[in-house]
Image (cartoon, rainbow, N blue to C red):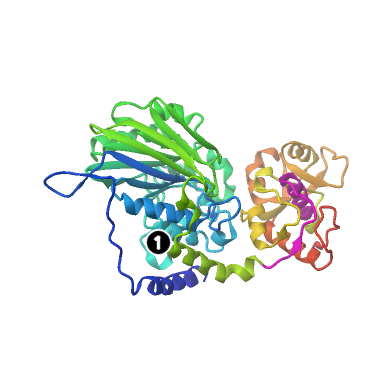
Amino acid sequence: MKKITLLLLLTIMTFGLFGCEKTPEIIPVDCDVTPDHEECIVDYLDIYYLNDFHGAILETDDYIGAANIANFLITKQAENPENTIILAGGDMLQGSAMSNYYYGLSTITLMNQMHFDAFGIGNHEFDWGLEVVTNYFDDDETNGEANFPLLGANVFLKGTTTIPDGIEPYTIIERGDYKIGIIGTVAYGLEYAIAGSKIEDYEFAPPVPIIEEYATYLRTEADCDFIILISHDPGTTLNIQASALSGDAKLDAIFNAHSHSDYVSSNMGLPILQAGSNGKLVGYVRLNLENNAVSSFTLENLTYYSNPLLQTPNQTVLDLVNIYKAETDALFNSPLITTDEYLSKTDLSNWISKLMRTATDSDIGFQNSGGTRINVADQTVINNSVLYEIWPFDNVIITAYIKGSDVKTLMKNLISDTTITTFNDDTYYKIATNDYVFDQYKDYFTNVNQITNTGILLRDLAKDEFTLQGNTYPFFYLDNPLLIEHD
C-alpha cells in the first residue's frame, strides 16, 4: 500500500512539475571538440560517489540532505555529461524513517533524479529480505524501478555460483569514445552483519578472483578502456590485493564502503576513496586521461562547505522530499517525550536490554552495541523519526532458554541487563534479545530451548514505552521506572 501511494503521488507530482515545462538544453562545458564532428573528446572523468547513505534524505546539522546533494550532482552532470559518472557504494536505503517507511523506494526515486550510473550492493540491502530491494531492479515499473543497475559480482545463491535475480556483476557505461566497466562486490565474510534469517539463502564469495575474472573479460571481450571497482568493504585487505591486479585485470579506481570511514588514498597508482556515511560527504575523483590510460588523478571528500551547490536544494528533489514529509509527518514527528539528560549509545543499549527483559518477563536482556546507532542529546524531543535513527533496523525480539554458562559467555560479548547476581552454569535462564543477536551468536549456545519469536519489533517496543512515559513523566530519564507490562 505504501508503494502504491508513493507511485501515485510521484505520477501526480511529475505531471505538475514537468507537464508544461520544456527540457532545458544541456550545453557541455570544458570539453574539446574535433574539427570534423561535434563529439566531445573526453580527456578526464569526474566520478562522484556516495556510500552508506542509510536513507539520510533530510538535511540536518550533520547531513547534507538529498536535495542539496542532488543540486550538486545534477548540475555537475548537466555541465559535463560526457565526463561525469555517479556511483553508490551500498547501504543506501535502510536507516531512516523516511526511507524505511517506503522500503527504500523513496531513496531509489531520489537516486533516479540524481542520475546514478550504478549501485554496488551492501549488507543492509538484505535487511528487509533481498527480494524487497531487487524488486526495484526487475524491469517492472508498477512496483517502482531504479534507472541504474544493482551490482554484486560475488553475491551468490548459497552453494552455487548463481547471482540472484535483480543483481548484475558489472555494468558498462560510455563516455565519449570510452567504455567504462564498473564491477560491484561485497566484503568476504560480511554475512555476519546480516540477520541469519535474511542471509541464509545467500553467500559472499572471495571477491578478488571474481574481480580479476570480470576485469579481464571487460577489457578483452567487452572492449572496456577503464575498470572501476565499487566494493562494500572497508578495504584493509581487499585494496592491497585488488590494486595488485595487472595486465588485462588492472583496475583504474577503487571505491570502498561499510566502515563509514572518511579517507582518500592511493595504492600502486590507483585512487582509493571512502566517503563517510549518511550523506555527510560526497566523494570525488578526477581521472585525467591520456593515450587511453589514466595519466594522473586527484581525489577528495567534499563537505557541505566545499561547494555552494551543496548548500542549495534542487527544487524538483525538494518537492519530492516534501511529498514524503507530508505523507509521513504525523507518523514520525509527533512528540513522545523530551530527554532531560544526554544519552549515549551504551546508555540506550542498556536501556533497551532492560526493556526487552521486562516486557518479556525474562531473566536477562541482550543488545549488540552496533544495533544502537546514535547518541541522543539533552533536550531532544523523542519521536518516531528519532527512534529510527537510534534503532534503524527492523529487529524482532526473540526469547529462549539457555544455560547459565552460555549466559556468562554472552555477557562478555554483548550489552546486557539483569537483576540476577549469580548465574549457575547448568541452570536454564530465559533470555530476550533481537533476532540479529540470536542468529549471529547461536554458536555461543550449547543448548537452547523454548525459542519464541515474539513478532515484536524492538523499535516498536521502545515507542510504546516512550509513549507511556510521555503520558506519565515530564521528561525522560534512564532511571525512570519502566511502565510496560509483560505478557
User: What's the amino acid at mark 1?
Assistant: Glu
Residue 457 shows in this picture: no
| Residue at disc 1, secondary structure | loop
Q: Nearer the viewer, residue 285 or 123?
A: 285
Whether residue 137 appears in magenta in the rendering, the answer is no
Query: Which residue shows up at 65% across the image and 66% down it?
Result: 333
How many discs appear?
1
Q: Nearer the viewer, residue 11 or 91?
A: 11
Q: Classify 423 as above or below 29.
A: above
Quadrant showing the C terminus: bottom right
Q: Which residue is mark 1?
A: 145
Residue 58 left/right relative to 239: right
Whether residue 345 appears in magenta in the rendering, the answer is yes
Image quarter for residue 315? Answer: bottom left
Locate residue 239, reporting x and y percent.
Answer: 45, 30
* Residue at the farthest front position: 308
Q: Classify 96 as above or below 413.
A: below
Image quarter for residue 242? Answer: top left
Q: Nearer the viewer, residue 112 or 101?
A: 112
Locate residue 424, reporting x and y percent.
Answer: 85, 39
Locate residue 414, reporting x and y percent.
Answer: 72, 41
Residue 449 left/right relative to 176: right
* Residue at the farthest left position: 36
Query: Which residue shows up at 83% across the image and 47% down it?
Result: 418
Q: Which residues are magenta?
A: 334-357
Residue 173 left/right relative to 464: left
Q: Classify 288 as above or below 478.
A: above
Residue 409 shows in this picture: yes
Locate residue 405, reporting x and y percent.
Answer: 78, 37
